[in-house]
Amino acid sequence: MKHDMNINEMNRREFIKRGIAAGLITGTAMITGGFDVFAADKSAIPDLVAVKGGEPGQMFDKAMAEFGGIGSFVKKNSTVVVKPNIGWDVGPERAANTHPALVRQIVKHCLSAGAKKVYVFDNTCDEWTRTYKTSGIERAVKDAGGTVIPGSSERYFHDVTINKGKKLSKAKVHEQILEADVFINVPVLKHHSSAKLTIGMKNHMGVVWDRGFWHRNDLHQCIADFATFKKPTLTVVDAYNVLKKDGPRGVSEADVVNMKSLIMTRDPVAADAAAAMLFGENPSDIPYIKRAAAMGVGTMNLDSLSIKRIKL
Amino acid sequence: MAMVNRNLRRIRRWISAILLVLVALVFLDIYGLIPAWGLRTIVYVQFIPSLMKTLAGGTSGLFTGFVLVLVLTVLFGRVYCSFLCPLGTTMDLMIRARAGKKRFSHSQPFRWMRYVVLVITVVVFLSGSLVFIDLLDPYSIFGRVMANLVRPLIILLNNGLSRLLETAGFYGLSPVAQLRFPYYVVVVVAGYLLLIIWLSIKRGRLYCNTLCPVGTILGIVSRLSVFRLALSKKTCTGCGMCERNCKAECIDVGNGTIDSSRCVGCFNCLAVCSAYSIGFSMQRGIENSENPEHDADRRNMIRMMFLLIAGFPGTVMAQVKRPLVFVKNKIPVVRKHPVTPPGSISIAHFTGACTACYLCVTRCPGKVIEPGMAVYGKAGVLMPHLSNRQGYCNFQCTVCGEVCPTGAILPLTREEKKQAQVGRVHFIRENCIVITQKTECGACSEHCPTKAVNMVVENGLRVPVVNPDICVGCGACEYACPSLPHKSIYVEGNPVHGIAMKPKTEKIDAPAADEDFPF
């Protein structure tokens, strides 16, 4: 920029430039209808969308369209953190981690909405460089233009107070969960030997540092307590391949069934309740879902929600 | 008669410097970028590891590193010590860096001590303990210094840099977790380093010519060398430059002799002799022939050997400790046997070959291989074992066997690894959180790769139930167990590794594709 340019002029030019760019993006979006911002009438946006019968990326596209496109969640120049489950050093066929194709599609959507940065991480169980790689998620995120960041060192986690917590009053939470404008939780639905099922709220255990404390101090209550502290902008449950037993790690591919399903909602309790039913469990049999609902995090009464069901 | 090549010193400096950097990188590669075959190639010529590997049955044929070194020695003397030994090159750097211009002068060898140390090492080894090999092998000392002292500094530097970049919003450089070494191991290793620095500054390569078993073995072999350095009395002006530059203190200008058993083949003398009076000669034993002093020494050595064989092992054995146990209150975890890495076959096999170089320690992604002091009692010192303090053995991983240069850990295929049972799970019900606090936990079962720890409902709560037959002993359960102060679940080492049974798998029927949503 030239030195003699005065400030007003610069602002005006900048304003015009941005205006044109915005117009172009909107126009393109309207023509292509891809991530269409104006397709759905605001009043018709459902509380929860359930899709089945498609591929992970395709099901995400369909569900997101029902919510009015990714633009309803991700503003231009915002920072997004996507939290899949990358806990285990096993491949996608074992369904112990979130499906990489779903993660790739989410990152793509966020960037198309003009997100400045899309970060993806997990505080893994197996050694992190291995799980990032073997899960296929590192590759998928890089391909889509996102950034994988570590959750492997205590220095990324900062002290927070959980005011409504009954058992969990303090935790150390990953800096991007605290800083990012948008938090998209992308759990994989699976059997879990200690929590019965792991879905969205259980996936939050990968954004804190000291999980041992949770295990020592009433696991289910701690999961519910943390849900009162941090509500994701959006929960996308991956139920494409579902680990039906021997979870959360699984022993072999025989533990996995191909359910080709996906659930998307802003309500973390409803996400877990719907996914639990998909799995064949009654949500009220899962203590952390019941307790989180009782603490007012969300609703497990799916009848009270407007649900859009899509079969592909 | 004599062949003189003044470039030999330069060639030696280059080769030794390159090798030093490469071997150092083996231990300092904090991101694990060097593949296993690269590591194997770099440490191929290290004498003791290669010898151990051959004795442990880890190599086939005679084309192993130590045989190559023996051939080189028969040809040119102890060039291993100046060209290939990373500890030797480290000492050379100390010698170069030392303050002032103090030079060396010829000294009498500590022949007696040399052979005593070698004999003790060999006898103790033959009686089943690697204590002295662990303590004295130069490659392993170098490895320990790198792994215990230098690597943590590199990691510190990396993590500082990583943090700096992250404050600028760049996540490109990831932090690497520090391994927490037992402090007494660090103290011992640091003590060694100080000793080596002090010895080399004071007396050059005295360590190599008194304590180092490789130096002594190659010194004996070098008596047979085809080509050896010799002083030509005809042309020597007696200026003494060679003697003053000889860090092995093996040149005696006054008598015109070079003690080839102590000569480390650095070729400094060739480079500094202005009269070209030192060169390779094919004449045998100039310096030793008709040396009555030496003959007497040899007789003494043989006498000592008998004495040692008769009496020494008992003395050594009497001083050693029992294996480490983990003792504390409530119901402490007490292991009868330490756990050795997968591929090490048995405690006996492992302790029969491990020189405690800690290469496996630095490469293990699970941070489960931990240095110890006397974990195996009389069988050796400083040898590592599997400890679940900082991590557990990754189910898929086969790195330690791929990189071990001594054959203490033999390579396994991934499928073999998944059934290699290094230990068996033990559950202490009375310590378990589900029992003591009556809440769900299950961290052990979550981490188990075979579901050898499963959760079974009991009074409405899920309680761990173990099936040791399908357990591989990876220790993921023990690592994850959050109960305090003692673990509720742990791995008891298998003195001889077993084969875990494969977990039963049952295919689950997929739901019908057109099934309705359940809500």
Image: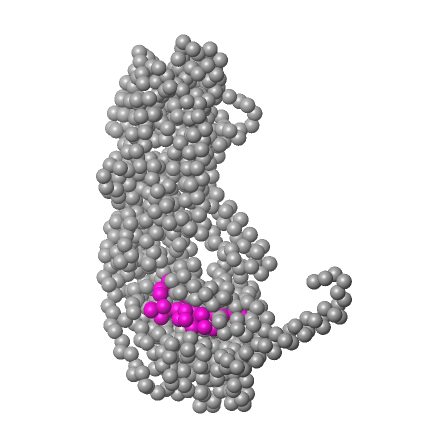
**Which residue does the image show at 32% across and 32% down from the upper left?**
B69
Q: Which span is picked out in magenta?
A: A80-106
Asked if one can make out residue A298 in the rendered structure from this viewpoint, the answer is no
The stretch drawn in magenta includes residue A103: yes
Q: How is the image coloured?
A: one colour
B332 and A136: which one is in front?
A136
Vertical relation: A202 (above or below) B29: below
Q: Position of residue A26 (x, y in %)?
A: 57, 79
The stretch drawn in magenta includes residue B137: no
Q: Position of residue A103 (x, y in %)?
A: 44, 71
A311 and B422: which one is in front?
A311
**Which residue does the image show at 29% across and 69% down from the upper left?**
A253
Vertical relation: B75 (above or below) A158: above
Across the whole image, how many numbered discs are drawn on residues? Answer: 0
Q: Position of residue A255 (x, y in %)?
A: 30, 72
**Which residue does the image show at 39% across and 13% down from the upper left?**
B232
